Image (cartoon, rainbow, N blue to C red):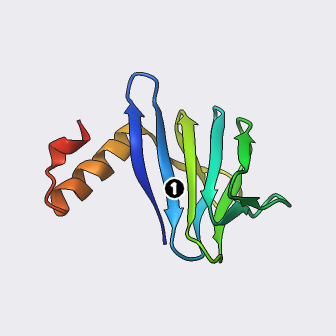
């Protein structure tokens, strides 16, 4: 139920900017970032299951490196949309909090190529 629209992907620095969005409640599996992340909430409500706050339209969130979290989009009158700047990979965590894979710019580019080809834009659109 959660997807993203890439705005900028930087292979050189393994970083990207995108708009994460969800039309209904949903989540991004537990993970952490070895580098900092910045987020600005455009609409809707979201947060981390492991934290006591909820971000709403206009809220800025700074995510310190190395903190494990599960991003959740909460039910809201508006779809959840947040602008993210991610530096470095996501490290997926298993149920015990141990690393269980990663997601980086190369994975993001491959997802884009597959999606763009499927919808008729052409895989090279990501370039």
At a point 29% along the width and 47% down the height, the residue shown is 110
Q: Vertically, is 91 above or below 96?
A: above
At a point 37% along the width and 45% down the height, the residue shown is 107
Q: Residue furthest right?
A: 52
Q: Would you say 124 lies left or right of 59 here?
A: left
Q: Vertically, is 50 above or below 1?
A: above
75 or 102: nearer the viewer? 75
56 or 27: nearer the viewer? 56
Q: Which quadrant: the C terminus? A: top left
Residue 6: where, in percent of width, then height? 40, 46
Q: Quadrant of residue 67?
A: top right
Q: Secondary structure at mark 1?
A: strand
Asked if one can make out residue 41 in the rendered structure from this viewpoint, the answer is yes
37 or 81: nearer the viewer? 81
Residue 23: where, in percent of width, then height? 51, 73
At a point 65% along the width and 76% down the height, the residue shown is 76
38 or 76: nearer the viewer? 76
Q: Residue furthest top?
A: 12
**Pointer 1 local density, CA inside 10 Å: few below 14, some 14–19, many at least 20:** some
At a point 55% along the width and 77% down the height, the residue shown is 24
Asked if one can make out residue 95 in the rendered structure from this viewpoint, the answer is no
Q: Which residue does the numbered mark 1 point to in the structure image?
A: 20
Q: Vertically, is 126 above or below 72?
A: above
Residue 78: where, in percent of width, then height? 59, 72
Q: Would you say 3 lies left or right of 54 here?
A: left
Q: Would you say 51 lies left or right of 45 here?
A: right
Residue 40: where, in percent of width, then height? 64, 46
């Amino acid at each position: 139920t959660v997807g993203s629209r890439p705005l900028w992907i930087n292979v050189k620095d393994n970083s990207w900017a995108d708009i994460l969005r969800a039309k209904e409640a949903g989540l991004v599996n537990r993970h952490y970032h070895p580098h900092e992340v910045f987020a600005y909430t455009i609409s809707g409500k979201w947060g981390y299951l492991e934290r006591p706050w909820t971000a709403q339209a206009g809220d800025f969130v700074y995510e310190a490196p190395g903190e494990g979290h599960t991003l959740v989009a909460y039910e809201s009158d508006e779809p959840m949309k947040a602008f993210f700047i991610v530096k470095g990979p996501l490290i997926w965590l298993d149920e015990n909090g141990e690393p269980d894979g990663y997601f980086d710019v190369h994975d993001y580019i491959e997802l884009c190529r597959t999606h763009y080809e499927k919808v008729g834009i052409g895989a090279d659109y990501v370039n």
